[in-house]
Amino acid sequence: MGVTVREARPEDRQALVELMGALHAFESAFEENRAGAEAADSHLAWVEKAVAELGGVILVAEVDGTVSGFIAYTFEEDPGTFVRPEYRQHALIWDISVAEAARGQGIGQALLRAAEEAAKQAGIGEMRLYVLEANTRARRIYEEAGYRNYERFLAKRI
């Protein structure tokens, strides 16, 4: 199996919508406030707009010529002065998804590594991401890739 990671192109959009839909369907199964696959196209459009406005990249992983995963991240800066200036700029991963049939083949790790390398080349020294607490599979993958808890974001439905 040969995995190629590259920047997304316009002709990849339908594959990105399908991957986003799979991510939405997966997350909505254990988090009731998550939209299902029907929101994939509009959410992808929102992510694409953020990447264009903030700077960032959407990368895809191809396996034997088929788009089998993607990662989207933007370049961000912490507001205010509570973080030292040299640590304020970071890359924020918005979404990552790997096709069900392609899981367990290292595609997610390849996407993370490629995103980290591209961000480093852009002068960014830290990657951040949000992960749902109930998404134990994703949390394990991120921890294996060297990510650690940085902050806790708590929620209470009222």
Image: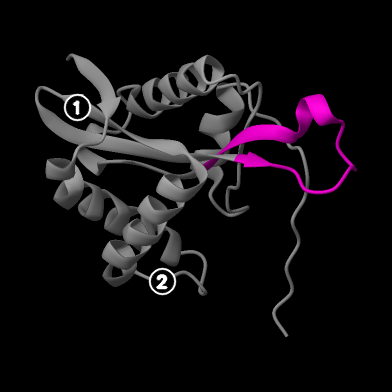
Camera-side residue of 66 and 139: 66
Figure quadrant of residue 4: top left
Magenta residue span:
76-93
| Number of numbered discs visible in the structure rendering | 2
Q: Residue at x 12, y 32 (%)?
A: 66
Q: Residue at x 21, y 53 (%)?
A: 18
Where residue 129 appears, x then y in whole percent? Answer: 59, 41
Residue 89: say if magenta: yes
Relative vertical location of residue 119 with respect to residue 56 in this rendering, above or below: above
On the picture, is 23 further left or further right than 145? left
Figure quadrant of residue 88: top right
Which mark, residue 62? 1
Residue linked to disc 2: 35
Relative vertical location of residue 147 with respect to residue 36 in this rendering, above or below: above
Q: Amino acid at mark 1?
A: Glu
Q: Look at the image and tell me in which quarter the N terminus lies.
A: top left
Where residue 136 appears, x then y in whole percent? Answer: 55, 44
- Callout 2 environment at 10 Å: few (<14), some (14 to 19), or many (20+)? some
Query: Which residue of the protein is positioned furthest toward the front in this rendering?
Result: 53
Q: Residue at x 58, y 53 (%)?
A: 132
- Badge 1 element: strand
Camera-side residue of 89 and 96: 89
Query: Which residue of the protein is positioned furthest toward the right in this rendering?
Result: 82
Q: Amino acid at mark 2?
A: Ala
On the picture, is 41 further left or further right than 15? right
- Badge 2 element: loop
Q: Earlier in the sequence, mark 1 or mark 2?
A: 2
On the picture, is 66 further left or further right than 80? left
